[in-house]
Amino acid sequence: MAKHRIYTTSFASVYPHYINKAEKKDRTKKEVDEIICWMTGYNEGELESQLEKKTDFETFFSEAPQLNPSRHLIKGVICGVRVEDIEEPTMQEIRYLDKMIDELAKGKKMEKILRK
């Protein structure tokens, strides 16, 4: 079976959409970066490096320094699918991130988004 197209899509090509979605709802790039770094363990410099290299989603998550164990607390529906029910690990990571960005855009407090 062929890989889903999102796996080979560069993270850098989707990143501006995350920023745009947040900023439309008066949230900030800094908050988006905080979510991404919380989830993946990248620091800001490492995140910037991944963006400059135009790393694809599959590599972005496979090279993540430390995927946050609390990300499994993320529940809910994104694109009509429950994130906790997604069986393919890379797709689940992508959807966890999508869900967190949605929560940011919906005005949730960062403490809740970061499962503190």
Image (cartoon, rainbow, N blue to C red):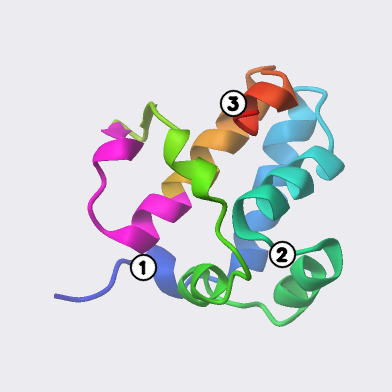
Residue type, mark 2 in image: Tyr
User: Where does residue 43 sit, x and y in percent of width and height?
Assistant: 79, 63
Q: Report the magenta residues as a range.
A: 81-94
Mark closest to the chain's N terminus, 3 or 1: 1
- Front position in the image: 77 or 17: 77
Q: Which residue is mark 3?
A: 103
Residue type, mark 3 in image: Glu
- Foreground tag (1 vs 2): 2
Residue at disc 3, secondary structure = helix
> Would you say the magenta stretch is mainly helix, strand or loop?
helix
Magenta stretch: includes residue 85: yes
Q: Is residue 50 left or right of residue 56?
A: right
Residue type, mark 1 in image: Arg
Residue at 84% x, 35% y: name it.
28
Q: Is residue 109 above or below residue 65?
A: above
Residue at disc 2, secondary structure = loop
Label 1 CA crowd tier, 10 Å (few <14, some 14–19, many 20+)? few
Q: Which residue is mark 1?
A: 5
Q: Which residue is mark 2?
A: 42
Q: Is residue 1 above or below residue 39?
A: below
Q: Are marks 1 and 2 in contact (CB under 8 Å)?
A: no
Q: Disc 1 to disc 2, how far (Cα)?
A: 24 Å
